[in-house]
Amino acid sequence: MTSRGSRGSALVAVLALLATGCAGPASSAPEPTAGSVVRVAAASDLRFALEEVADLVASEHPDVEIAVTYGSSGQFAQQIGNGAPFDLFLSADLAYPEQLVEEGLAEAGDVFSYGVGRLVLWAGEESPVDPSDGLAALAEPAVRTAAIANPEHAPYGRAAVEALREAGVWEAVEPKLVLGENVAQAADFVRSGNADVGVVALSLALAPASGADGRWVEVPIELFSPLEQGGVVLAGARDPAAARAVRDVLLAEEGRAVLASYGFSPAD
Amino acid sequence: MSGSLTVRVRRHVVDAEVVVPLGGAPVTALFGPSGAGKTTLLRCVAGLERPDPGSLVAFGDEVWCDDDRHVPARSRRVGLLFQDHALFPHLDVDANVAYGLRGVPRSLRGERVAEAMATAGAGHLARRRVRELSGGEAQRVALARALAPRPRLLLLDEPLSALDTPTRSRLRVDLREVLVRSGTPTLLVSHDRTEVLTLADRVAVVVGGRVLQVGSPAEVFGRPADAAVARVVGVETAAPGVVRSRGEGVLGVEVGACRLTAVDVPGEAALGPGDEVLVCIRAEDVALELPGRAGASSPRNHLPGTVTAVAVDGPLVRVDVDCGFPLAAYITRPAREELDLVPGSAVVASVKGPAVHLVPHPQ
Amino acid sequence: MDWQAVTVSARLALATTAILLVVAVPLAGWLAFSRRRWTVAAEAVVALPLVLPPTVLGYYLLVAMGARSPVGRWWQEVTGSTLAFSFSGLLVASVLSSLPFAVQPLLAAYGGVDRRLLEASAVLGRGWWGTLGRVALPLSRAGLATAAVLTFAHTVGEFGVVLMVGGNIPGVTRTASISVYDSVQAFDQVAAGRTSLLLLGFSLVVLTLTYTLQRRGGPGWPRP
């Protein structure tokens, strides 16, 4: 039947049109040509620091643009394993980039350290809690909710749990815990007052957007294994040169200065 | 056109066989009470329902449906008229009538539409919207729609049942003319006696899913083949009786306490004394007199009795009389008034011998 | 206000709606008019995304489309990029997750069409597609409109599946709903508030439109 045939081919034509229109994401998004967009998967403790570093990149390499997605390091490692098209991965835990090397998704030589993260006990502007008493303060009844990042896949969460155990307050605090998808979400719980206090990244507590009246106290580093921050240029990067350029800016003197201003200790 | 439409269908309650000659007088009616399966039969012929295995529907040499194949409705080139027009509400009259003209070149479609509408008496309804049409008008348009593709077979499913009485009467006569003029073999389903008498050249009586009798309207209605048919064709009086005598071309039948004389029709089932029968008398054939009018008259049967009920039925009055067995009579209204018949009146019922029809009815 | 994300959402919703209308018209027709008994099972499968947690849908989609799956690998060979974490992958996920929103209104509308009209069409010589396109569909315009509106709106509102399958890549898979999530984590209440208000207003408009369409006429709207 002719009408059936022509209807069928019209269908195929429409679908094909839509598919081609959508298949090339870069072609339709308002961005420069592929090759000068570096897709960065960044641990969320870098959220504010990386914005300043991006400005540095823009001034040094004007034709390179950075598109950043923030999240928890463990989630990114898993996504990259599933083929997520990132060029550069900045992780809050060096172990994840090393794992990707083992999986064949990056060269060992492209792994680099860029700092050591620090953990703080942070209470928001209107919180009733005084963090200066340290982790023990969390056990007090005045503290109803405490936020940490999800220890399953966020390095800061894992570190927080370690610290709480070492401080001997884990049993008392565990029922009060509120888990954030990543350390930034945990910090937001604190900032918004939804959690009385949190064990989060120093870099987030220092951010201007966090509010001036929050109070924080550093968690002693003996209580948890060091948060070695590490990154890697991925094997699947579309423009490895551009990705390495971004890395170099991060590791250069000005980059390190920015990181230091957000509380990252230098890499060993 | 030669050959016949062979319908041998088993489905749900239906287990029927009917052969409809396709040449000559075109209209065959399936007549019977509601639920008898007539519509099911029609739908199987149309291809809208699939009968059970063992069935056969063949149009001449062309097998439409048997155990191996089922030709879909769209390929059978039949026309179908539903009880309630089933016109497409989103298309206007012309578009509806032209719907089946897909194979016709566009330039000729207007002509065909006009032709079909004229045949169906719907020419004045061109371009109207479906929702503006009255019941009768819509049914005419539906008829035009069915006729426009020049189908090989026309199927009418209770085409007039949904209409009010005056519209029905008018359309009935027109419909007969249309069917005769178009000459298309037609299968009609109806439970209305007048409709069948007016429209059909041939009647198949369908009761309980089975075809009980096929013949001309006169045959079927005048001489029902058995008790079931008799009931269905509306013989108002059907009383059990026993043949007591036979001779001189007449049969004597004992019914209740009465003796009736019936005509011994040659060729029909030979009946003899002792045979149990159903005595069928049409109410129109019963005349009523007031008692006391003696004198010779031709009707052989004069049955005295008492009126038990009087009911108006259109232009006629139905009078039920108890003369030893229940007997129904149709008389005109002026007659009832003149005789002043009310329940309790004494009357004498007269029935001519030929009007007493005997149906073998072993108990 | 993250206009880039709003644009991604709009493109995704438009593409999903266009694809689903083409798919749903015959699919709903098959579900409505088929006499086979197992179409009930098919109907249940179509309705799954309504009750499945989006994360479950996202999980299965990643398994089916991810770089390690046969489909993902084939896509990589043909196009050179991954299916998961791309707009195309998101489109696939979105089409599947919004499928019942397109099919069910149409199914309901088809169900309201007088069966005898469909039979008349068949006797007058039309096949299945002809009857669907010339009788069932024109008499189901309200259902079609509802399907389009709901599909569009549901896609804009998708979050869980998009996050799992899309990966929140700006300009590519970061939709408006995800950008709200992102803004909150960036402590940017203002941006989050603006985008949320936009989405809220949009949803209200959609719902009002849907109810107006449904009230205006049942399956037979519009009548000529």
Image (spheres, grey):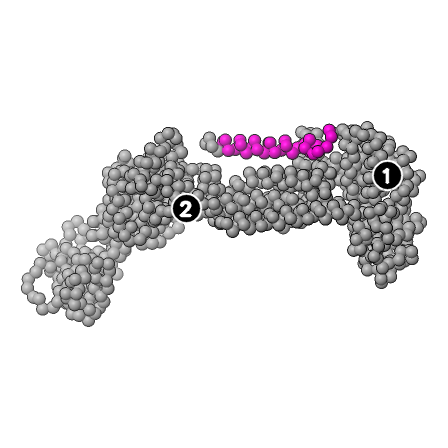
Quadrant location of the C terminus of chain A in the rendered image: top right
Q: Main secondary structure of the magenta part?
A: helix
Q: Position of residue B58 (x, y in %)?
A: 34, 39
Vertical placement of C138 versus A4: above or below?
below
Q: Pointer 1 and pointer 2: residues touching (CB < 8 Å)?
A: no
Give the image quarter of residue B333: bottom left
Mark 2 Cα-neighbour bin, 10 Å: few <14, some 14–19, many ≥20? some
Which of B296 and A114 lies nearest the eye of the viewer? A114
Residue A197 x/y as whole percent: 84, 55
Q: Residues within 10 Å of mark 1 (few under 14, many from 20)?
A: many
State the extent of the magenta-drawn residues as a range: A5-33
Q: Is residue A14 magenta?
A: yes
Q: Let me know if residue B307 appears in the view.
A: yes
Where residue C116 is drawn, which disc sits there?
2
Secondary element at tag 1:
strand
The answer to whether residue A11 is magenta is: yes
Q: Assign the N terminus of chain A to one quadrant of the image.
A: top left
Looking at the image, residue A124 lies above or below residue B3 = below
- Residue beneath the point at 89% across and 33% down: A252
Residue B103 lies left or right of residue A255; in this view the side is: left
- Mark 2, chain letter? C
Q: Which mark is residue C35?
A: none
Q: Chain of mark 1?
A: A
Residue tagged 1: A230
Question: Mark 2 belongs to which amino acid?
Answer: Arg
Residue C140 appears left or right of B46: right
Q: Amino acid at mark 1?
A: Gly
Regarding mark 2 in the picture, which secondary structure is present there? helix
